[in-house]
Amino acid sequence: MKRYKTGISQPILPSEITPESVYRDRRRFMQAALSVAAIPMVGFPSLAGAAEYDIPADLPRYKGPLWLQQKLADAVRNNDFSTSEALAPYYDAITHNNFYEFGTDKRDPVRNAQGFVTDPWKVEISGEVAKPGSYNLEDILAPHALEDRVYRLRCVEAWSMVIPWLGFPLADLIKRFEPTSKAKYVQFTTLMDKDQMPGQRGFFGTIKWPYVEGLRMDEAMNPLTLMAVGLYGNALPPQNGAPLRLVVPWKYGFKSIKSIVRIHFSDTIPATSWNDIAPDEYGFYANVNPQVDHPRWSQATERRLPSSLLTPNIIDTLPFNGYADQVAHLYRGMDLTKWF
Amino acid sequence: MTPVERIGLIRWWLIFLLLLLPLGLLLEGLLTDDLGADPAKYIVKELGFWALCWLWLTLAVTPSRKLFGWRWLARYRRMFGLYAFFYGLLHLLAFATFLLGWRWDILITELTKRPYIVVGSVALLLLLPLAVTSTQGMQRRLGKRWKKLHALIYPASLLVMLHFLWQIRADFLQQLIFAILLALLLGYRLYLKRLS
């Protein structure tokens, strides 16, 4: 029997506390809820598409703010963009995280992020766009229906997991803000908040906070690139990058930046955190590539988690993490050993 | 058994069990399935960390005796050294078994492409003859050469430090602490040598 000594024992998550705005609008909300309930529950094909996940009863489900809950419930599995490989256990996905803002050990984020306030949340859109500004997350998400996509996640540390995300294509989001012809790159920034993020307070780290990541515009517009707000049918747990994170499945995991507060468009290549620290080890592209080793270790194979001790689950790493059909054309003619 | 001998025996067992404790905790975590989503990596890391600690502890025996007059510590130096080797050996075995599944093709590429694994392995190889010749009988038989042979702990500790430095990703606090400690431990010996 697995004991879940993870520190996830907080009785009330901040995300479960009703925000004031919702509280004030409760009357209107109740009326809306009642009117929906009055419709006979027949012929709702979209509900049939919602996936069910095996979540142990003693593990927390992250519900997210009220305004997000219906969207999460309405998410439909997109099988065209999903792998049928075995999912990582929910426990593994929410307790094994690289989120250095909350500590460098894999189990630090689940211990340190439970009180992380992710609602209300604002995202700044800036740079080469027709509609820059600071937007509430609720408004950013409003027009987008959520999809359930099962992606492989390959960490640069040579382990991998299969995760069901809830999100929507980044391309759909970008189009709304109308990038100008000068928008060649997009840069993402994680929240900077030393009070909430103990990892940002240390003196002995090499990362210059806040964490930043970036994509070339055509990478950002590729239909595989996902903005995620949930996993396993629920809202994103704080340790997984709530309330809004990027998922770029053909690149090493560190490109999939968490807890995004800023999306900036530019015509020059943006700074990215790991590339800043060690440009010889982490490239801007960071495409999963078994042919190009990390200077300190091989990338030819990976350990797919969960991996048993005596017969480790070692599999061959695929070019572009198995998504070559969808994305290899983006890099045609490029020397991938140079642009790693 | 005199009371003094009894206290000595109790102390020996306490120290013996104390150094065994990290391994015990790992086994407990393993049996209760409480080592996280990637127990393999966790076990390998922990075993390596404690091997490093016990090696530094072994190196601390002589300076503590000379600086603080802790003569009693010298009786445990062999135990400390053997524990360092034991944890180091388990660290390597855990790496080869839990992380590589003894796949020779991967083992060979890892050995060539991950220089820190070569460095760590060489350090363990240097410690092997020290573990083998750690008995009193061997110490008598080797005489003066014993001390010379056991000076291998110094290059071994430098290689272990390099092996540890090579793991740095974003945070280097641990590496900094152990590097400073090693500099003090080895620096003190150089200082003594210059005095004599």
Image (cartoon, coloured by chain):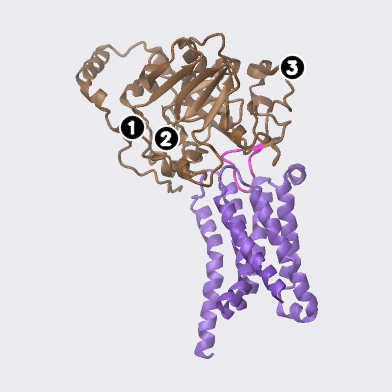
Residue A76 visible, this orientation:
no
Same chain, labels 3 and 2: yes
In the rendered image of the structure, the colour used to display chain B is purple
Residue for badge 1: A15
Task: Please report the bounds of the magenta region as a residue range.
Answer: A302-314
Whichever of labels 3 and 2 marks the residue nearer the N terminus, that label is: 2
What amino acid type should be assigned to the residue bearing mark 3? Gly
Residue A294 lies, in percent from the top left, at 69, 37
Q: Position of residue A245 (x, y in %)?
A: 48, 27
Q: Is residue A88 visible?
A: yes
Disc 1 or 2, which lies upstream in sequence? 1
Whole-percent x and y of residue A69? Answer: 35, 24
Q: Which chain is brown?
A: A
Q: Residue at x 60, y 15 (%)?
A: A218
Measure how far apart labels 1 and 2 are at the Cα level.
Answer: 9 Å
Q: Which residue is mark 2?
A: A238
Element type where label 2 sits in the image: helix
Category of crowding for the residue at label 2, using alpha-carbon neighbours closer than 10 angstroms: few (below 14), some (14–19), many (at least 20): many
Query: Which residue is depicted at the point 62% across and 55% down?
Result: B48
Q: Which residue is mark 3?
A: A333
Q: Say whether marks 1 and 2 touch (CB < 8 Å).
A: yes
Q: Is residue A278 above or below residue A250?
A: below
